[in-house]
Image (tube, helix red, strand yellow):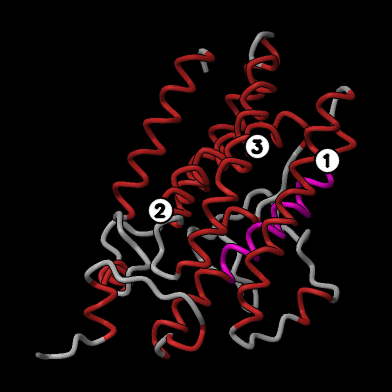
């Protein structure tokens, strides 16, 4: 009887459960995935923290503070798994410029910055409360699609963390939609929201990656990806279209 290689095992839906049985190539891709999530959550938390004082009322202030806290908590959960692989997590304990942003008019596509694995959308600045709400909604709906995918990764401890995180992140989007519905009730609020949508939609879309990504096949064989970038982007676009219809935006 021929023994199945670990690559074949993963390609056929196998799961890994500890750092000790992870091959080197798999380890590299897994850590890249985790670093991207951690950096994105910390950057999102830092950016949204500045919007707390822009909130127009106590309820919205509490919602903004809750989102800021929970995104940092989600980063910490995944960071603990990275530490199990011997990753030096010291830079996450020190001062890293997670709140740094590019000029509003910048356009970097899906480019990552040196030493920072956050999704490119988290390099752009928020511009007031309505803009923060719109960004939270459109990126939150993207995160819903992305976390459904991440919850199936072949490294079981990480999949379990993502499954626990997913409903909390979904609630962040729901809080944003509640706020956006109120904003859209006035002519001025609706106009501002539409301007923010025009700014954020292409930047969030870039986070799904290229439609014909060469990396997808490699990650798929390792059980780290299951759905294509194009399929995930299409699902998000359908969610956005439904939202715009509901809110007349």
* Residue situated in front as seen by the camera: 53 or 30: 30
- Give the class, few, some or many, for how many residues have Cα within 10 Å of label 1's Cα (few <14, many ≥20): some
Check disc 2 and report the residue beneath it. 149
Q: Say the numbered circle drawn on residue 172.
A: 3
Instruction: Choose top left, top right, bottom left or bottom right for residue 181.
Output: top right
Q: Say the numbered circle drawn on residue 207.
A: none
Residue occupying the point 51% across, 84% down: 19
Location of residue 101 in the rendering, given as x and y in whole percent from the top left corner: 72, 58
Q: How many marks?
A: 3
Magenta span of residues? 35-51
- Give the class, few, some or many, for how many residues have Cα within 10 Å of label 3's Cα (few <14, many ≥20): many
Residue occupying the point 63% across, 42% down: 168
Instruction: Name the side, left or right, on which 59 lies relative to 45.
Output: right
* Residue situated in front as seen by the camera: 180 or 13: 13
- Give the class, few, some or many, for how many residues have Cα within 10 Å of label 2's Cα (few <14, many ≥20): some
Q: What element carries label 3?
A: helix
* Residue situated in front as seen by the camera: 97 or 179: 179
Reply above or below: 160 against 69.
below
Q: Is residue 239 magenta?
A: no
Location of residue 104 in the rendering, given as x and y in whole percent from the top left corner: 68, 49
């Amino acid at each position: 009887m021929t023994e199945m290689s670990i690559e074949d095992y993963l390609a056929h839906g196998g799961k890994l459960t500890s750092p000790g049985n992870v091959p080197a190539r798999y380890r590299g891709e897994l850590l890249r995935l985790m670093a991207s999530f951690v950096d994105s959550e910390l950057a999102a938390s830092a950016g949204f923290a500045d919007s707390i004082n822009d909130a127009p009322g106590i309820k919205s202030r509490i919602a903004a503070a809750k989102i800021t806290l929970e995104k940092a908590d989600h980063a910490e959960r995944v960071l603990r798994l990275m530490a199990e692989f011997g990753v030096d997590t010291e830079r996450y304990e020190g001062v890293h410029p997670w709140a740094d942003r590019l000029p509003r008019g910048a356009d970097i596509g899906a480019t990552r910055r040196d030493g920072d694995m956050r999704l490119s959308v988290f390099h752009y600045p928020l511009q007031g409360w309505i803009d923060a709400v719109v960004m939270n909604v459109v990126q939150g709906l993207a995160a819903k699609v992305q976390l459904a995918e991440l919850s199936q990764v072949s490294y079981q401890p990480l999949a379990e963390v993502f499954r626990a995180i997913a409903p909390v992140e979904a609630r962040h989007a729901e809080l944003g939609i509640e706020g956006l519905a109120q904003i859209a009730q006035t002519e001025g609020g609706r106009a501002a929201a539409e301007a923010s949508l025009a700014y954020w939609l292409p930047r969030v879309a870039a986070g799904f990656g290229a439609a014909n990504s060469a990396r997808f096949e490699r990650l798929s064989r390792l059980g780290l990806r299951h759905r294509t970038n194009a399929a995930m982007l299409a699902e998000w676009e359908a969610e956005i279209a439904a939202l715009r219809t509901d809110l007349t935006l």
